[in-house]
Amino acid sequence: MNTFLTMMLTLMSAGGLLMAGTATASELQVGDAAPDFSLPGSDGKTYQLTDYRGKRAVVLAWFPKAFTPGCTTECKVMASHGAKLKEFDVAYFTASVDKPEKNEKFAKSVGADYPILSDPEGKVARAYGVTGRVQKWASRWTFYIGADGKILYIDKAVKPATHADDVASRLESLGVAKKKAGK
């Protein structure tokens, strides 16, 4: 009986771990259409992926939770090194499942000169696979989306301290156009 109970608990734990993770059989892949979103930004505007389709690439950098050390570092770096990102014809955002009011305060605290998006219900985060059934905060993943709305690259090994430089390098390697002078 004890062995049976141990085996059942082990199987249940393994199943729970699978459900808790963000990887699923239908996990987004390079080449897939990026899930549409309409999310409030820390600047009071609403941002929709469809607004950029056919116009420019989009970077959507999910982070776990506002005002935590790694997320603060990541968002500060995105602001302080934003000039490198602004060289590209790209719209870029960081995003979390925090409430808009919290991300508005967070954006001010890190000096964000770009919108931090909020998905408090987690619907968009689930569509991107960055949250799971148990995990309610977003995984630190960055999605690179082409002007055609298809996923160009997914970075699942984001380094907060170098994120802006890493994003700029990735945009370069993906062949995302640089802005023309005067734009």
Image (spheres, rainbow, N blue to C red):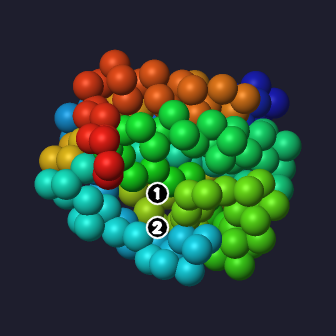
Give amino acid for label 1. Arg
Residue 72, horizontal then vertical, whole percent: 78, 47
Q: Residue at x 41, y 70 (%)?
A: 47
Residue 49, horizontal then vertical, whole percent: 31, 62
Residue 52 visible, this angle? yes
Query: Depth check: 69 or 168 in front?
Result: 168
Query: Depth check: 27 or 158 in front?
Result: 158
Give amino acid for label 2. Lys
Residue 57, horizontal then vertical, whole percent: 29, 45
Q: Residue at x 55, y 62 (%)?
A: 115
Q: Residue at x 50, y 54 (%)?
A: 93
Figure check: 137 above or below 99: above
Figure check: 85 above or below 50: above
Q: Residue furthest front?
A: 182
SS assignment at label 2: helix
Q: Give the left or right position of residue 122, taking residue 34 as reference.
A: right
Badge 2, how many Cα within 10 Å: few under 14, some, many 20+?
Answer: few
> Mark 2 highlights which residue?
123
Q: Residue at x 54, y 71 (%)?
A: 41
Residue 95 visible, this angle? no
SS assignment at label 1: helix
Q: Give the left or right position of residue 97, taking residue 1 as reference.
A: left
Q: Give the left or right position of residue 134, taking residue 153 as reference.
A: right
Figure check: 53 above or below 164: below
Residue 145, horizontal then vertical, whole percent: 31, 43
Badge 1, how many Cα within 10 Å: few under 14, some, many 20+?
Answer: some
Q: CA distance from mark 1 to mark 2?
A: 5 Å
- Contact, mark 1 vs mark 2 (Cβ under 8 Å): yes
Question: Residue 126, labelled with which disc?
Answer: 1
